[in-house]
């Protein structure tokens, strides 16, 4: 194999943020907005669930018919399952907001990831090529750690 051959590969780069008052405020605002959205989803789910149940009952000749009751029960089960899922999302968001509030200034936290490409050649240490991170402070890059 040709030792001068190189290829470009995709890698994930970890983004780390330095906690500042601006970062904390933005993170809390983002989480509060997400919590508000989840609350709206819960409200909408309840409304739609009641509407479907009302429609099923109003369209049947005998609302007490076991088949109608079964349909209503299925709808209510589906609504309950979706409600549990949404409530779990809300609990997670509330927990994240609480964790953000407890962070200390200048602490470094994981912010997410971005993808990038790099060239690799025979003889390169792939693990080191893949271990790259960027640290930002209020959106401004402070460092790029590249273990190459």
Image (tube, rainbow, N blue to C red):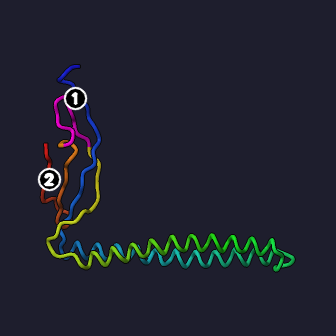
Q: Residue furthest right?
A: 61
Place of residue 92 in the rendered image (x, y in percent of width and height, measured from the top left)? 39, 72
Which structural element holds mark 1? Answer: strand
Report the disc number at residue 6: 1
Q: Position of residue 139 (x, y in %)?
A: 20, 63
Snapshot quadrant of residue 71: bottom right
Q: Which residue is mark 2?
A: 144
* Distance in Å between CA atoms under marks 1 and 2: 23 Å
Image quarter where the N terminus lies is top left
**Image point 21% across, 34% down: which residue?**
120
Q: Is residue 114 magenta?
A: no
User: Which residue appears at 30% of the width and 76% of the height?
Assistant: 28
Q: Which mark is residue 130?
A: none
Query: In this rendering, is residue 114 above or below 79?
Result: above
Residue 91 percent location from the top left of the image: 42, 76
* 75 and 139: which is toward the camera: 75
Q: For mark 2, give the secondary structure.
A: strand
The residue stretch that appears in magenta: 117-127
- Crowd tier of the residue under label 1, counting other residues whose Cα lies within 10 Å: few below 14, some 14–19, many 20 or above: few
Q: Which part of the image, by quadrant, shows the C terminus?
A: top left
Along the viewing direction, whichever of 123 and 55 lies nearer the viewer:
123
């Amino acid at each position: 194999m040709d030792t001068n051959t190189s290829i470009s590969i995709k890698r994930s780069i970890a983004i780390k943020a330095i906690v500042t008052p601006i970062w904390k405020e933005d993170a809390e605002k983002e989480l509060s907005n997400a919590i508000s959205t989840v609350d709206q989803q819960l409200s909408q789910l309840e409304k739609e669930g009641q509407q479907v149940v009302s429609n099923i009952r109003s369209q049947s000749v005998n609302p007490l018919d076991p088949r109608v009751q079964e349909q209503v029960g299925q709808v209510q089960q589906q609504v309950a399952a979706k409600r549990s899922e949404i409530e779990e999302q809300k609990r997670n968001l509330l927990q994240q907001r609480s964790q953000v509030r407890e962070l200390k200034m200048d602490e470094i936290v994981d912010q997410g990831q971005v993808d990038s490409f790099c060239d690799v050649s025979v003889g390169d240490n792939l693990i080191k090529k893949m271990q790259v991170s960027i640290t930002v402070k209020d959106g401004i890059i402070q460092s790029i750690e590249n273990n190459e």
